[in-house]
Amino acid sequence: MKKSKNTLYLCEFTLGLMAALLFLNLYLSRKIPASHAIHRLFQMTSVLSIVIIVLILIQREMLSRLLVNAFRDITGVHNKKSLEKKIQDLNSRPDTFNIGVMMFDLNNLKHVNDTFGHEKGDEFIQAFTYCLTRILNQHSFLARYGGDEFALIQENTDEKELQQMIRQLDDLVREYNSHSSLSLSYAVGYEVSYRNHYFMMEDLMNTADKKMYKDKAQKKMLATCQAPAGTGNKVIPTISSELLTQKIRQFQNRNDTISNIVLVSTDVENFHFINDKYGYSLGNEILNIVYEELASTPASLFTSRFFSDVFVSIVDTTEFSRNALLEQIQLLDRRICQRIQSTYQISFFRTNSGVCYISKDAEPENMISCANVARRIAKKMVSHSCIYSPEIDQQEKVQAEILHSFHQAISDEEFQIYLQPKVIPENGRISSAEVLVRWVRDGRLFLSPAIYIPLFEQNGFVIELDYYVYEKTFQWLRAVTGQLPDSFRLSLNVSPLHFEQPQIFIDKIQEMIQKYEVNTSKLTFEITESTYVNNTEAVNQVIHNFQRQNIHISMDDFGSGYSSLNTLKDLRFDEVKIDRKFLGDSLNENAKIVLQEIFHMLKRMKKSIVCEGVETEVIADFLKNEGCNEIQGFLYYRPMSIEDFETVMHMQKAI
């Protein structure tokens, strides 16, 4: 493209030069007698100049058209490449205020192409393009960036103007449809960037695109509701738990072997989002497609809807090994996803499947439960599929034992407070500590927190456990008043579940502080970065209340994979705790540069910096040199019991 532009510039220069030579020849030929040989030479040169000028003009026109076509679609509007350049130009501006984006999707283009041919399809889309171009003005930029999708960028605009343009387009489409055998219909979504409602160009495009697909789904649902009787969704066969149990028993009672017969439980990922966004009618259409695909699988012996968006299938896997079975399930998932995506343009669709082998001796109810457990595990797996195994069975039994014994463990005070010190890098002295919890049974550590804490997070037990930990911590703080350094602080972790009802959490902590007469200047509450990102308003409510009581707030797990830099600009935390994953086992040059810049920003914002998970002298020296306020990690101290911590603090005080 750049080469073509350079050639065009050369054409312009050569054209000017030849024109000058032509005029010079004409002028000189008049000064010389007609019989003179030089006069005839000038005449020949003039003719040659005219020929060259004509050739240059032809080449110039061809190059101009080439340059225009490079950024134009066959419909005459800008193409995707031109759109990308426009977006890039707008992004380079200081702001995107008063820029609007409208996204259009032309309906039924595929039907027209398939039924009447692509030539008629081209006419169909050109008719829609004609209507679109009629609503443009000097501030408009229209581009076709997909087969039936258009983007309109409108500068110096507001929401009212975009709505007016849509009404104008509706009128044009109605006018066209009144005398056309192929009616136009479309979906549209729009968004505008303005002060206090600011979007970057990519966000504008994405938001308008989402609204367009929502409009498409709503119009489709409306068309379904208005359809004549008898054209509604099919009724999917549904089976109760009792009937499914009987069905499984029928296979168990067969004379031939059933070692290759499996029960498969399949659901749609986040199906309630589809219902909420696109409506229940379209949701039912999607469930019909899922059922059709599951039931049409050659190996399927029986398929039915179990409840909600969950389906059960009994499948003969004689021809498949366990790995081959998982591959077949994954292929089926991809086929369903592709069909949904091509039909409804839903890009986030996926299914999850859990498998349990049917045996003669097992209770059908247990096998149904096992298939459902495997399905829930599949939600966390890349393959979206899982076969119930002895290992999963053992894990389920452990989890059941953990949940069953939780309240008794609380009553018996099996959960004990442990402390992991934080040190000052310059001298290695303990300056604060993080409060952790350990499950101690019969004098020994019982299970890892990595096993039971996520489980308690899932079922809500973690709220009760947190309050237990806070109370034990406050009791200890009251007992050791005067024995800790004046600047010493204890850090307490806060579960994300507390922010579902932040005022209850605030009131409970206030009540405990008053009960145990806690010196709040010794408290720091650690809130994870992900919690802040996902529930900013509730977190800020807690921060505002606690900071008024001189309680410090620490952002835990900073750099663990969320919008870290984005959260920094609105940071209301007193302290930032750099996640151990950010540090790793070693620091390369790029990691050092990133950390240096983060430290620089945090220091300018007057935030305290803590780094956790430090295990090597090299990393510790780097953090010390960069001005890290506190370091926590196995290099200095591991988590220890209250008694051991008191001993360490006593030894430090004696030095």
Image (tube, helix red, strand yellow):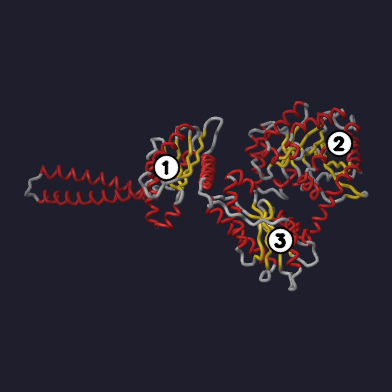
Q: Which element carries disc 3, helix, strand or loop? A: strand
Q: Quadrant of residue 273?
A: top right
Mark 3 neighbour class, 10 Å CA radius: few under 14, some 14 to 19, many 20 or more: many
Which badge, 1 or 2, comes first in the chain's sequence? 1
Residue 9 screen position, x and y as percent: 33, 46
Give how far apart the Cα atoms at labels 2 and 3 are.
Answer: 45 Å
Farthest-out residue, top:
548
Q: Are marks 3 and 1 in contact (CB under 8 Å)?
A: no
At horizontal 80% and vertical 50% (from top left) the residue drawn is: 451
> Splitting the image into 4 quarters, where does residue 414 fall?
top right
Residue 51 on image: x %, y %: 20, 51
Of the numbered discs in the image, which one, if any, rests on residue 355? 3
Query: Label 2 is placed on what type of residue?
Result: Thr
Task: Give me the disc on residue 155.
Answer: none
**Residue at the limit of the structure toward the left, as seen here:** 35
Mark 2 neighbour class, 10 Å CA radius: few under 14, some 14 to 19, many 20 or more: many
Give the labeled residue for mark 2.
Answer: 473
Sequence-earlier tag: 2 or 3: 3
CA–CA distance between discs 1 and 2?
63 Å
Q: Quadrant of residue 365?
A: bottom right
Q: Which residue is mark 1?
A: 142
Relative to 184, 540 lies left or right? right
- Extreme right residue here? 442
Q: Is residue 267 above or below residue 521?
A: below
Image point 62% across, 38% down: which residue? 566
Q: Amino acid at mark 1?
A: Leu
